Image: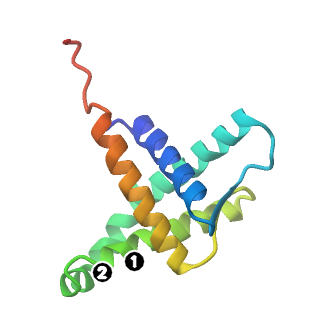
């Protein structure tokens, strides 16, 4: 999937997680609809970059735990990436707030499911055929 499409689907997934879970909020400062969309896109950009560059390293380092738990530790890795994105955006003075670890686990599950559904709906390549 192209990078911008990945950021857009992640923004929708973060919006869904913030809407469905009470412990996840995105501080949009009530500046209007377009500003809120922009903030969601910036949070999604940070989250996508973390997933692209930090998550593979964390996954590699936690490989023994992933094998031992038959992949369930991957939920912990996803939650940690969400908490890291929240920490980065809060250091920048805007964005994502996650109340705790278990909220991050729930948010990571919601984001993964929404991303999976949206990624299935978006074609990988536009080839011009009908």
Vertical order, 57 against 44 (above or below): below
Residue 64: x and y in percent read: 22, 85
Relative depth, front residue between 118 and 68: 118
Residue 32: x and y in percent read: 77, 37
Q: In which quarter of the image is residue 38?
A: top right
Residue labelled with disc 2:
62
Q: Which mark is residue 56?
A: none
Q: In which quarter of the image is residue 109?
A: bottom left
Q: What element carries label 1?
A: helix
Residue labelled with disc 1:
76
**Separation (CA) of disc 1 from disc 2:** 10 Å
Residue positioned 41% across, 36% down in the render: 5
Relative depth, front residue between 83 and 60: 83
On the rendered image, what quadrant is the C terminus found in? top left
Left or right of 23? Residue 67 is left
Residue 50: x and y in percent read: 46, 59
On the rendered image, what quadrant is the N terminus found in? top left
Relative depth, front residue between 89 and 79: 79
Left or right of 78? Residue 20 is right
Q: Nearer the viewer, mark 1 or mark 2?
A: 1
């Amino acid at each position: 999937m192209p990078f911008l499409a990945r950021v857009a689907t992640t923004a929708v997934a973060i919006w869904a997680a913030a809407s469905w879970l009470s412990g996840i909020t995105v501080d949009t400062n009530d500046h209007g609809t377009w500003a809120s969309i922009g903030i969601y896109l910036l949070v999604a950009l940070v989250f996508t970059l973390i997933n692209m560059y930090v998550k593979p390293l964390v996954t590699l380092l936690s490989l023994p735990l992933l094998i031992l738990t038959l992949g369930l530790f991957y939920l912990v890795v996803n939650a940690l990436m969400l908490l890291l994105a929240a920490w980065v955006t809060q250091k920048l003075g805007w964005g994502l707030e996650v109340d705790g670890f278990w909220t991050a686990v729930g948010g990571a599950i919601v984001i993964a499911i929404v991303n999976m559904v949206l990624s299935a709906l978006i074609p990988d390549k536009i080839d011009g055929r009908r």
